[in-house]
Image (cartoon, helix red, strand yellow):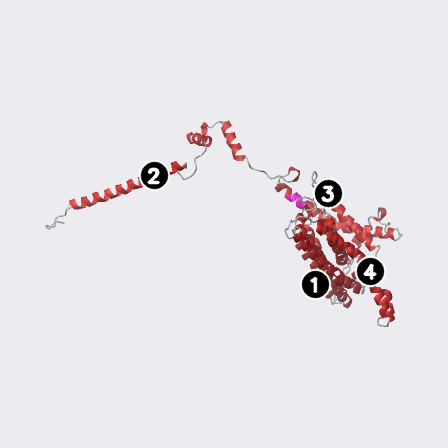
Amino acid sequence: MSSTGTPTFGASSSRNRSRDTRCANRSSRHVATLGAGSERRAAQGKGPEGQRPLPANRAASASERARGANSASPERVSGAARDRTRGLTVPVGPFGLDPLVWLPIRLLIAVGLALFLILNGALLQIYLERKIQAAMQDRIGPYHVGPFGLLQTFADAIKLIAKEDVRARLTDPYFFIAAPALVFTPMLASWAVLPFAHDVVGADLNIGLLYLTTLGSMTVLGIVIAGWASNNKYAIVGGLRSAGQLISYEVPQILALVSVVLVVGSLSMVDITRSQAGPLVNVLVLPFSFALYFISALAETNRTPFDLPEAESELVAGWLTEYSGMRWGTMLALSEYGEVTVVCSIMTTLWFGGWQGPGVDVAPLLGVLWFTLKVYAFVLIFMWIRATLPRMRIDQLMSFCWKGLIPLALLNILLVAVLLMAFPDTRIPVAIASWALLLGFVAGVPYVQRRRLATLRARARAGQVPAHAAKAG
């Protein structure tokens, strides 16, 4: 304001003009900066957004699309569609099926085969074992029910289902009922990771072998619970003896599996099977580990010569004393024969190529036939051994495990690990060492037995042990 109090508009106008001038200068500097950046990007060959310019053909297509989608010809549209789909791969399952269609078919095949091998397989094995043992013992075997006695096993199953469920008054009601399920469920769950053919497996776990060994250890829990819940002194003693046998022979069994894992480098059952796609299967590389597993499997499944829990000289019926009807059939028939089929399937998968065989590349489901034939070949060997070998005593059984199989299994793992580190590119040294161990084992067992008998006879002559102990060995 002036000294007279009248407002002065000239100063305000000058301040507004100076402010407008500053804004205009700032805008011009900003425009100049943008222009310099555009020139710099143009010199570098980039577009307005800092990207490389489109090729000429794609740029022309973009300009045509900018002029209007209606101007594009059908040929140009179909060519663009081919460009968008070029390089994409559509997965195709076996027989040209879509993977989403093949997945439920694969699961149905795996479940159906598992149920066939467990339920019908157990009935078939019982019939075959009766006929084979009868032929080896110069007998006829079952022949009354059905043609050639084929329906005899079905008649026995119907009898067990129809029998009364007798239970002692002092048994534990809950654990007595739960014990058969604890024995049967691990065997049933083992089939989830066993591959029957290419892409025919319930679950391809990367720890499938560890899964199988864990389930195998759970059977011992069911046997001990069955003996304890029966509230019978014979049942509990028989259960503890069976548990001691199973726990002892699990050690060499698992150690035999470790050598296969060292050679293959995977715990997946599918990967182990695929590693034997050529003619060199694992039994040719690791024959001694296979022998260890085979002997341990006989003891784990209570088969001769390790069938003490089912022997006629067992205390009444061992841990099965108080069981009858279908509970007895579930634990003895289905569980035992199902476990035999499981260990035979494991041996087939780990050492004999699983479903690998002629023609599986052309017809993948042909692997199911090869797998079944190999499994039942081992089942027949189990039956042959039962009709041939005598039964061992409990002290001989435990001594053979802890003094013989376990030290040899540890030696086998040590040799395999050292040779794989020394010769990582070839398996020939591992195969030579394994075959040498197997031949030494076969030759050494009779020698050790003769030395043992000679020592017992010498102690019997000296009066240190009874004479009948030296005769029994």
Answer whether labels 3 and 2 touch (C-beta < 8 Å): no
Q: Which residue is mark 2?
A: 36
As for residue 410 lying within the magenta part, the answer is no
Quote the CA–CA distance across marks 4 and 3: 39 Å
Question: At 52% from the left edge and 33% from the top edge, which residue is drawn?
Answer: 83
Question: At 31% from the left edge and 41% from the top edge, which residue is drawn?
Answer: 30
Horizontal and vertical percent position of residue 417: 67, 55
User: Which one is earlier in the sequence, the residue at label 3 or at label 1?
Assistant: 1
Residue 295 appears in which quarter of the rendering? Answer: bottom right
Q: Is residue 260 visible?
A: yes
Q: Nearer the viewer, mark 1 or mark 2?
A: 2
Please state which amino acid type lies under the numbered disc 3: Gly
Q: Which residue is mark 3?
A: 357
Horizontal and vertical percent position of residue 69: 45, 30
Answer whether labels 1 and 2 touch (C-beta < 8 Å): no
Helix, strand or loop: magenta stretch: helix
| Disc 1, SS | helix
Please state which amino acid type lies under the numbered disc 2: Ala
| Disc 3, SS | loop
